Amino acid sequence: MSAAVATSLFWIVAAAAIAPLIAGSLRHKPIPEVVLLLVAGIVIGPYALDLAQVDSEIGMLRELGLGMLFLLAGYEIDRDELTGRGGRRALVTWLACLALAFAVVGALAAAGLVHSEIAVAIALTSTALGTLLPILKDRKLIGTPVGRAVLNHGAVGEIGPVVAMAILLGARGAVASLVVLAVFAVVAAVVAVLPTRILREGTALLAVVRRGSDTTGQTSVRLVMLLLVALIAVAAVFDLDIILGAFAAGFILRRTVPDGDEQLEHKLDGLAFGLLVPIFFVTSGMAIEVSAVVGEPLVLLAFLALLVVVRGLPVFVASRTDRASGLDTGGQVQVALYATTGLPLIVAVTGVAVDAGQMSNATASILVAAGAITVLVLPLLANAIVSRDRRPRTTSAA
């Protein structure tokens, strides 16, 4: 490791260590740690103090962080829920979001106000489920009607944009991209069968894995990392975004341990949120061109408005018309606010578009900044609705 790489890594890890200290010192944690990580990345990045750079070594850690984020998101998804009524409704809602995004962005492009319209449209339909998971867990929403609805919309809001990226932003063309996606799905299905076949209850190999899980061998964690890296490698071979491989790995892991494994989950959380995921968010902040964001405040506000209109409004309408969801008006607004929260996929989509020369880094920076603002503001608004709804009601004396 060169001195430059070591110095950059030091500042990135220092930023990752300081962010939770600041977040923990704030009363009621009003600012999500993710936002603090992004801000720290901006400060140490090339567009501010220029203390750190993202080279190939740090880029690898960044990719692993993104992979762990989506593996854990895929692991949290209930497959039966996703393929059931709620999941189908979320898919229809996302398709409506995508159609609305293309209509709105197409109109803006015709007026010369937007370029790289495909990438912008896809970015507007995303939901940051991986980012929302810690917030939902902290607020004890997992398993509630709001939590289930957010998980459904969030899962489709992550898978849908990734598939759309592969088809619409790939260099192969739509038909060839669909064929490649189908082949990847077949490979992932084959990989999904292996853990349940090899690690059947009562087998000697499963006993070895369990014995090694509490030793320095940490066999269960290493096998999960093997699964993640294997699916990421398969995605890379097919020239697909690694998010797709990571999400597939999360689904396979949940299929392998359908009832969950609290001990394994704690270890994965420690590995992911202790190092790799913070590196992803800090380096994402380093890519934000501050001058471009500050110089175009109206464009930033326009992107924020588009996110609310394109993603939040259809989700609210879908929740409003779903009589079986058990959600009141406050819950419906909550689901819409959470579903509009987007960041990692906005980073991924804009990164692909910038690398392909279809989007400028300035436009990408504004989109990422808009995504960061949604992470900061919308969960706070959703939480305020919960707090208001939980206040004890007083009745006036007769």
Image: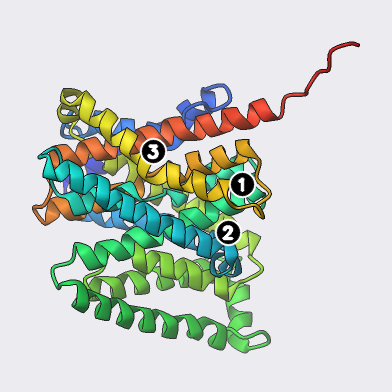
Q: Nearer the viewer, residue 327 or 372?
A: 327
Question: Is residue 259 at all visible to an observer of this figure?
Answer: yes
Q: Which residue is mark 3?
A: 308
SS type, badge 3: helix
Q: Nearer the viewer, residue 53 or 182?
A: 182
Residue farthest to the right, as pictured? 398
Q: Nearer the viewer, residue 274 or 379?
A: 379
Q: What's the distance in space between the residues labelled 3 and 1, CA to CA?
A: 18 Å
Q: Which dot marks residue 268?
A: none
Instruction: Judge depth for marks 3 and 2 and give the one in front.
Output: 3
Instruction: Work out whether 42 lies above or below 2.
Output: above
Residue 60 position in % (x across, y down):
26, 57
Residue 183 position in % (x across, y down):
31, 83
Q: What's the distance in space between the residues labelled 3 and 2, CA to CA?
A: 33 Å
Question: What's the residue type where badge 1 is placed?
Answer: Val
Instruction: Judge depth for marks 1 and 2 and give the one in front.
Output: 1
Instruction: Work out whether 211 lies above or below 316.
Output: below
Q: Which residue is mark 1?
A: 146
Q: Earlier in the sequence, mark 1 or mark 2?
A: 1
Q: Earlier in the sequence, mark 3 or mark 1?
A: 1
285 horizontally vs 203: left or right = left
Rendered residue at 54%/70% (across/down): 83
Mark 3 Cα shell of 10 Å, populated few (<14), some (14-19), many (≥20)? many
82 horizontally vs 114: left or right = right
Question: Is residue 351 at all visible to an observer of this figure?
Answer: no
Q: Which residue is mark 2?
A: 265
